[in-house]
Every structure is written in structure tokens, then in C-alpha cells.
Amino acid sequence: MMNCTKIDSSGLEVIFITHQKALEQHINFVICQPNNYVANILEVTNINRLLTVYQTKQEALESIWRES
């Protein structure tokens, strides 16, 4: 998400729906590299409690590899 500079309710809805569909398919959906603004919105809305947010792409990939 490093190129995403802003996020609104529509973007949050897309993340939430994608997360739900990933759960149904037993797929691990994570967020990586959000900027400070987006990370703050994810925290305020508690979306960061539904899915894991990683600060780097490498951390996200390593977590996915560990779980597979």
C-alpha cells in the first residue's frame, strides 16, 4: 500500500470485503507498507485487528511463507 496516500470508507470497504472473501477461501490476506496516514486510519477503524499489517513487503512475504 506504499503508493496509497489516502483511504476513505470505500477503500476500507474493499479491504474488509477482500478480507472476508480471503477467509472463505482460506487465503491469508495482509496489508504491507501503509504510510502513516493509512496506518492511522486502519488503527482508528480497528481493521488492523482483523488482519495483519506489516511495515515491509519482506515481512509480509516471510509471514506468508511461514504459514504455507
Image (cartoon, helix red, strand yellow):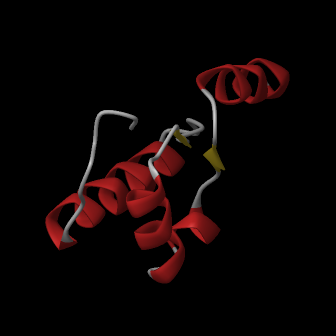
Pinpoint residue 36: horizontal percent, then vertical percent: 47, 57
From this viewpoint, which residue is outermost toward the left? 10
From this viewpoint, which residue is outermost toward the front? 36
Quadrant (top left/top right/bottom left/bottom right) for the N terminus? top left
Residue depicted at x 46% and y 67%: 42
Pinpoint residue 50: horizontal percent, then vertical percent: 58, 66
Q: Depth check: 65 or 1 in front?
A: 1
Q: Is residue 24 above or below residue 29?
A: below
Q: Quadrant of residue 9?
A: bottom left
Count of marks, rendered view: 0
Pinpoint residue 23: horizontal percent, then vertical percent: 53, 50
Q: Quadrant of residue 32?
A: top right
Q: Depth check: 35 or 22 in front?
A: 35
Residue depicted at x 25% and y 65%: 13
Q: Is residue 68 above or below residue 12?
A: above
Q: Is residue 15 above or below residue 25?
A: below
Residue 18 relative to residue 63: left or right: left
Residue 24 relative to residue 64: left or right: left
Residue depicted at x 30% and y 33%: 3
Q: Quadrant of residue 14?
A: bottom left
Q: Is residue 8 above or below residue 5?
A: below
Residue depicted at x 52% and y 37%: 33
Pinpoint residue 59: horizontal percent, then vertical percent: 73, 28
Quadrant (top left/top right/bottom left/bottom right) for the C terminus? top right
Residue 53 relative to residue 44: left or right: right
